[in-house]
Image (cartoon, rainbow, N blue to C red):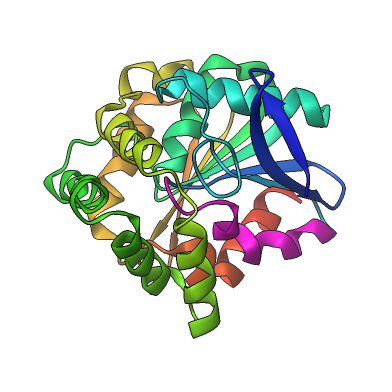
Amino acid sequence: MPYTFVEQSVPLYYEAIGSGTPIVFIHPPGMGSVTFHRQRELSSSFQIVTYDLRGNGKSGKGNKPITMDVLASDLHELFHHLELKEAIVCGYSNGGSIAQHFALQYPHQVKALILIGGFSEVCTPLLYGEFLTGIYAVKWHGISLLANVLGNAHGITKEEQQMIADYVRLSDRKRLYDMYVTGLHYRSTDRLHELRCPILLIYGARDYYVHAYGRIFQQHAPNVRIVYVDGARHQIPTKHHKELNLIIRSYFA
């Protein structure tokens, strides 16, 4: 299995397939790189890179407290390991917050940002409630309940639901809890004007509780486009993978 080591001792699991313009995918807390298994077909047009955040999936947890700076630094070290000078960075849900922070910290390495269900801060009641649900699920019920919820929500088939749930169960409980808390308090809104790369926002047309964030991006960032996926809620990488993959090809191939 391919690993690189960040901070010299923390193993970071990744997969890289295909050739062409690199697209690096960042998963939400807990879900791991399998979140994007249906984007592997894009490897006929791009180099597809997926990885497990520290404390998630097959990656090590390390000793440092979880911060956006630490998560962005991990990705920077993965870029160095893979000899990527520049890539399209795609973050899903709270993975999009990591993608934004990486683009702010290492702007020369980001050719474009793709944010699926993305937000620059948690400032609406429904999204706040989503984070609290994750925080309390991990704190009081452990990872197993959350694994089943995420698997059932994202999987199209029973096999896919089980695969995602099993992967979530690999997460380190403390790191997962800290990631939810970090994501809840992260705010990039006041720095969006610094993002000079193109930003493509992809929202489910029925994912109403995050649509307001698209307007925030448009108000603060200079180069933003928004695409809505008909009939979709939040789980676009799995349940609407055909549309997502077509959108990515249409904009970047």
Magenta stretch: includes residue 170: no
Where 138 falls versus 156 (above or below)?
above
In this rendering, would 30 be left or right of 86? Answer: left
Magenta stretch: includes residue 35: yes
In this rendering, would 204 be left or right of 87? Answer: left
Measuring from the top left, give residue 24's x and y in whole percent.
66, 41
Quarter of the image for residue 178 reads: top left
In this rendering, would 129 be left or right of 10? Answer: left
Where 125 falls versus 244 (above or below)?
above
- For this orientation, the residue located farthest to the right is 19
Q: Which residues are magenta?
A: 29-44
Measuring from the top left, give residue 117's x and y in whole percent.
39, 51
Q: Is residue 85 visible?
A: no
- The residue lying at 74 percent from left, 39 percent from top is 3
In this rendering, would 142 be left or right of 96? Answer: left
Measuring from the top left, give residue 209's x and y in whole percent.
23, 54
Measuring from the top left, give residue 173's x and y in whole percent.
36, 44
